[in-house]
Amino acid sequence: MATTTIQIKRRNLRLLETLKVNMDAKSYDEVIEKLVAEKTSVPDDMFGADKGKLLRFSEKDRLEDRD
């Protein structure tokens, strides 16, 4: 997974550090992910609904609609 750097105020860093401990999170990313999921109320089952159900494209699939 790609990572990025963001600028935040020191106060927010301290808040994230506190939340990380309180939430028993392994990373700041995990803290942010939990907070966003909580705030948006997006059910977990919306993501990956077809996980494990979809098959990779075969060579036949790639050439199916070509003349």
Image (tube, rainbow, N blue to C red):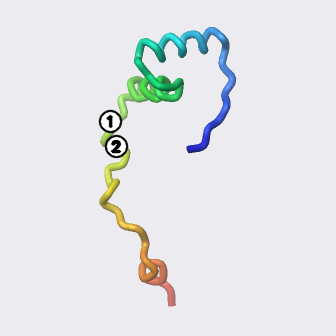
Task: Tell me where residue 39 appears, x and y as whole percent.
Answer: 41, 24
In this rendering, would 39 be left or right of 16?
A: left
Look at mark 1 in the image and give the residue it sits on: 43
Q: Check whether the beta carbons of the residues at disc 2 and disc 1 lie within 8 A of each other.
A: yes
Residue 64 image position (x, y, % from top left) = 44, 83
Viewer-side residue, 18 vs 54: 18
Give the residue displayed 47% in from the left and 28% down from the top. Answer: 30
- Furthest-bottom residue in this view: 67
Looking at the rendered structure, the kind of residue marked 1 is Pro
Q: Which residue is mark 2?
A: 46
Q: Nearer the viewer, residue 17 or 49?
A: 17
Helix, strand or loop status at disc 1: loop
What residue do we see at 47% from left, 78% from top? 62
Q: Is residue 13 above or below residue 28?
A: above
How far apart are labels 2 and 1 at the CA level?
6 Å
The amino acid at mark 2 is Met
Please tell me which residue is depicted at 43% across the width and 72% down the height of the picture. 57
Q: Where is residue 17 drawn, in percent x and y? A: 54, 14
